């Protein structure tokens, strides 16, 4: 195969073109799939979507060389390598990296989901011969209910809480999850107040064309009658304790676990995720039709085994199955 794929320090590296994919530490050149902090570092040169470029500027100011590509547009990375970005469906601006050299195509997904959302571009996975895919929820028990059903339950929780004279507090990541919830709250015409971190990211979404007319900055003196959006790390903060009468809920894919409500110590948990669930992961492989799959993150080894049982050449990068892979005649650098 034309593509060599290495795992170095927990990051994906393509040695033939000296390109990293979501490098965890500063490197000369990295593709950045989206603007969550665990995918950012101060690289000398980055390849990003325009949406990610704008969000990165807000989250990680600084001077760097940026190659911001429109989705689907070809870019000559070098004399032999063509690159394109495709929407990943994870959060706004999130992208998959597609590359081709010597007649063979490669796809790195980053975080992705196939289920449609309100606040991110719809995922458009292209065909590829070699795929590196994230498998956070790579076990059969992680199949999420329809998003519309989950959001209806979130709205019902908020309305019931408000009717009882308390303040509903929804916990979701300040970038991505919060805006997905805000879209549903806006449609339901529920007035919303935002934690400062959520407000900062939401302003960028508004600059990029998303409208949230019912939301405003948090003010404790006027919080009654509002839904409050807060990042998960605010659960035990002094900021939250100012709201005396409150009911809390966490939006996370891990809510499908029976112990989730105790783990998060909330009044409710809702299985809303911006990652692919198990069904999405299987459907993704069917759509892309790869010759070889490398899995990373979460239940990578388990999902790779599932694919092998289905007759697909699949291996978890950085996992114990590297010995198994060597016995089969393949090679993975680590």
Image (cartoon, rainbow, N blue to C red):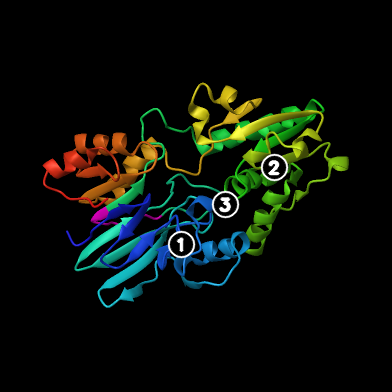
Residue 219 x %, y %: 83, 45
Of marks 3 and 2, the one in the foreground: 2
Q: Which residue appears farthest toward the right when viewing the image? A: 221
* Residue 229, label in figure: 2
* Residue 119, label in figure: 3
The residue located at (33%, 42%) in the rendering is: 283
Q: Which circle's residue, 1 or 3, is located before the other in the chain?
A: 1
Q: Are marks 1 and 3 in contact (CB under 8 Å)?
A: no
Residue 243 at least partly seen:
yes
**Within the image, what quadrant is residue 60 found in?**
bottom right
Of marks 2 and 1, the one in the foreground: 1
Q: Relative to 234, does residue 259 appear above or below in the rendering?
A: above
In the picture, the quarter occupied by the N terminus is: bottom left
Residue 157 x %, y %: 68, 29
Q: How many marks?
A: 3
Classed neighbour count for the residue bearing mark 1: other residues with Cα under 10 Å, few (<14), some (14–19), many (≥20): few
In whole angstroms, how far apart are the C-alphas of marks 1 and 3? 29 Å
In whole angstroms, how far apart are the C-alphas of marks 2 and 1? 32 Å
User: Circle 1 is placed at which residue position?
Assistant: 26
Using residue 216 as the reference point, say whether residue 9 is left or right of it.
left
Residue 257 x %, y %: 49, 25
* Residue 225, label in figure: none
Q: Which circle's residue, 2 or 1, is located before the other in the chain?
A: 1
Classed neighbour count for the residue bearing mark 3: other residues with Cα under 10 Å, few (<14), some (14–19), many (≥20): many
In the image, which residues are magenta? Answer: 124-130
Q: Chief secondary structure of the magenta span?
A: loop
Q: Are marks 3 and 2 in contact (CB under 8 Å)?
A: no
């Amino acid at each position: 195969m034309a593509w060599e794929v290495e795992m170095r320090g927990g990051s994906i590296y393509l040695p033939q073109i000296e390109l990293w994919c979501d490098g965890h530490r500063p490197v000369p050149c990295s593709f950045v799939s989206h603007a969550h902090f665990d995918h950012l570092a101060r690289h000398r040169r980055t390849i990003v979507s325009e949406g990610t470029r704008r969000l990165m500027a807000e989250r990680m100011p600084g001077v760097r060389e940026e190659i911001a590509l429109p989705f689907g547009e070809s870019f000559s990375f070098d004399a032999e390598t063509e690159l394109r970005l495709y929407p990943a469906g994870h959060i706004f601006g999130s992208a998959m990296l597609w590359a081709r050299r010597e007649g063979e195509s490669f796809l790195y997904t980053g975080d992705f989901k196939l289920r449609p959302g309100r606040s991110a571009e719809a995922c458009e996975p292209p065909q590829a011969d070699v795929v590196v895919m994230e498998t956070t929820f790579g076990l059969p028990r992680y199949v999420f209910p329809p998003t519309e059903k989950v959001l209806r339950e979130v709205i019902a929780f908020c309305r019931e809480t408000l009717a009882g004279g308390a303040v509903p507090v929804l916990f979701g990541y300040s970038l991505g999850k919060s805006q997905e919830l805000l879209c549903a709250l806006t449609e339901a015409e529920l007035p919303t107040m935002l934690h400062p971190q959520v407000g900062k990211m939401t302003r960028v979404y508004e600059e990029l064309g998303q409208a949230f007319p019912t939301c405003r900055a948090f003010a404790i003196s006027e919080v009654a009658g509002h839904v409050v959006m807060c990042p998960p790390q605010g659960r035990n903060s002094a900021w939250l304790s100012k709201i005396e009468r409150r009911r809390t809920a966490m939006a996370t894919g891990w809510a499908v676990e029976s112990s989730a409500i105790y783990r998060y110590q909330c009044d409710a948990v809702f299985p809303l995720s911006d990652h692919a669930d198990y069904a999405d992961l299987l459907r993704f492989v069917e759509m892309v039709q790869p010759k070889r799959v490398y899995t990373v993150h979460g239940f990578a080894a388990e999902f790779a085994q599932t694919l092998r049982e289905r007759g697909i050449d699949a291996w978890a990068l950085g996992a114990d199955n590297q010995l198994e892979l060597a016995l089969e005649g393949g090679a993975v650098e680590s």
